[in-house]
Image (cartoon, rainbow, N blue to C red):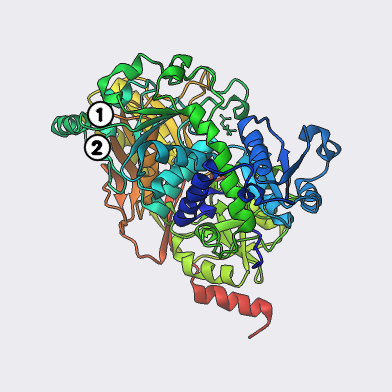
Amino acid sequence: MAAVEKRDLISIEDLSDREIEEIFAIADEMLALDRSGPGAQALAGRIMATLFYEPSTRTRLSFESSMQRLGGSVISCPDMRSSSTAKGETIADTARVVSSYADVLVVRHYWDGAVQAMAEYADVPVINAGDGGHEHPTQTLCDLYTLKKEKGDLKGLTVVICGDLKHGRTIHSLVYALARFGVNVVTLAAGGMELPQYVVERLESRYHYNLASVTSKDLQAVVTETDAIYLTPNQPHQLALFTQVDPKIQNRIRSIASGLKFDAFYMTRKQKERMKENGGQRAEYPSLDERFLKERRFKDTVVMHPLPRVDELSPAIDKDHRGIYFKQAAYGVPIRMALLKFLLTRPAAAEGRELRRKAQLYESPEALGPECANTNCVTRAESLSARPRFEIVFTGPGGSLILRCFYCDHQLKVQYVGHSISKRYCPYDIALAATVTEWFQRRELAIFDSIKQAEELRYEPYKGGPQRSIMDEEEIRSAIHQVAEQILKESEEIERLLLLGVKTKGLILARRIAEEIEQQSRRKIEVGEIEIFGSGEGIRRATAATDETEPLALKDRPIVLVDDVIYTGRTVKSALSIIFKAGRPKSVRLAVLVDRGHREVPLKPNYVGKHIPTSEKERVRVKLREVEQDEKDKVVIYSIVTPDHAMEQNEIVAGRS
Ligand code: NCD
């Protein structure tokens, strides 16, 4: 027999579409398996170890049942808290040791990325049975298989995904797979539990896929909130950008929507254990009952749930033929039998793996370096088992440099870059992309979260080219005044206006504009903050809230998005996607202090402090007194450190000249 290469299943992206189909074909055979025939001994002599650091009924028992039905046996720890973990053993050591006792490990852990980390230390295949709020690929195999069994072909189906889309790992794996198989996905999230931005960005960048989102928390909204429905994958759907929604468009949408069929509702429970204390307590949570399904349009809509359910799914649906969640759980056995057989006996090239990890990963050459933005990431929780490693994404919003955590996929915006040989650093700018790529390829790229970090490692700042001030304190003040005046003039519902500042400088400007409007109108203006990539991805109130769990309302409100500089337009594009996911505003307008031109995305700001056409070699920096110590407000322009300049310094220091 040909040697079988160790093959892990950490993400649903570790399997190609063809391999998923192959697993489904094996699952069909498993359903018809003669339990006394030779097929039932396919894994005889093999041992599977189940390591569950979190509660489980279905996943664990169906895996154990699957292994035994194929003639294999199972070893397990009844409770990982009674294993050496309690004595402080790292997951790396546990993985190493157990992999010498078993032929395959099935692991569930409460940290995002923990199973990936363990797979790196295990000599045998490792299967992810759920890692924190990240992924749950084998549940997705069950989900897809169930859907396929019920509906035939997956392509062109419409699935409404409801509930806690933020913490629900089953959802994350599922949407990637649905996108790949051409299913239309409508999301209906509970307040503050929208799909994480890193998932949305991945769908867009990897699969060119756009989700439809319904923003009311009431399930009825999938019928009434019709503008969600005109979207199909691959189609730009934000018709309402920067315009008031046109009633004619609304009507057209309504007529299209009434013809839409729904093939499945996929409900999920609120993942309380992944929320901070009292998190989400007050948020309205969608629920599904038998009355809702009475509508004719849901005649053929099946109801799915990964289980366990709490109170989002009425037991009255259990008897209805459309409630297929127990069947979905039962398919867990043939699917996991098929998966085990596939991973342990198929001597094929690992094609699916190519989907996920091919690129060179970034690892800091220094003792200090960037940290993953996700506090539940294994690299934060146990760096001994997983050193921070990232995929580098050069085409990030605003031309910024983005790091995507290899373990948990969360994204991080790079602030400072340095060169490890010349020991120089500077803030990252799009004009540095080529230089930084070269440093990265030569493993000389240092990345820092802060100046403090760079200086602790004795890096010195690169000197920029000559600086020129292009706006002074007075000009900035008057620009803000004018923008405020214009916004006030063009706003019909000033009391409902929301100024949303892009973190950090956009927020400062939004606050200043709000103050101006308040003075001019004598009305209180609400200000919010939007973070694109970072620890608190998403939208929140900028003023102290009495109850933080109440999400900021966006629905039907006029919004002005505020940022300091617009250049490529990518930041704004990402901000819009976050806004439209969190709520359907009445309109979104854009205010910026400086417009640099050179847009990559077709966007035009409604309010501009100053137009400053710049060359790509130049850098514009807005300095605001709130964040720059001892500085007055000003906007400066200067040329960037060129690759030649950087290399020159490098050679001098490295003594090669
Ligand atoms: C899910 C899980 O553990 O993520 N359960 C499962 O495996 N079927 C869903 C959940 O716990 O809500």
Which part of the image, by quadrant, shows the N terminus? bottom right
**Residue 24 place in picture, x, y as percent:** 48, 47
Above or below 120: residue 534? above
Few, some or many residues within 10 Å of mark 1 (<14, 14–19, 20+): many
Three-letter code for the amino acid on which mark 2 is drawn: Tyr
Instruction: Identify the residue shown where x is 51% and y is 70%.
Output: 435
For label 1, the residue is: 226
Few, some or many residues within 10 Å of mark 2 (<14, 14–19, 20+): some
Q: Is residue 644 left or right of residue 597?
A: right
Q: Whereabouts is ligand 1, in terms of quadrant?
A: top right
- Whether residues under marks 2 and 1 lie with C-beta atoms below 8 angstroms apart, the answer is yes
Which part of the image, by quadrant, shows the C terminus? bottom right
For label 2, the residue is: 230
Instruction: Identify the residue shown where x is 16% and y is 34%.
Output: 249
**Residue 350 place in picture, x, y as percent:** 56, 62
Say whether residue 471 is visible: no
Above or below 564: residue 326? above
Instruction: Identify the residue shown where x is 54% and y is 32%.
Output: 330
Farthest residue toward the front? 36
Residue 584 or residue 559, whichever sits in front: 584
Farthest residue toward the left? 248
Three-letter code for the amino acid on which mark 1 is drawn: Thr
| Residue 112 in which image quadrant | top right
Farthest residue toward the bottom? 657
Residue 644 or residue 72, whichever sits in front: 72
**Residue 193 place in picture, x, y as percent:** 48, 29
Residue 315 or residue 603, whichever sits in front: 315
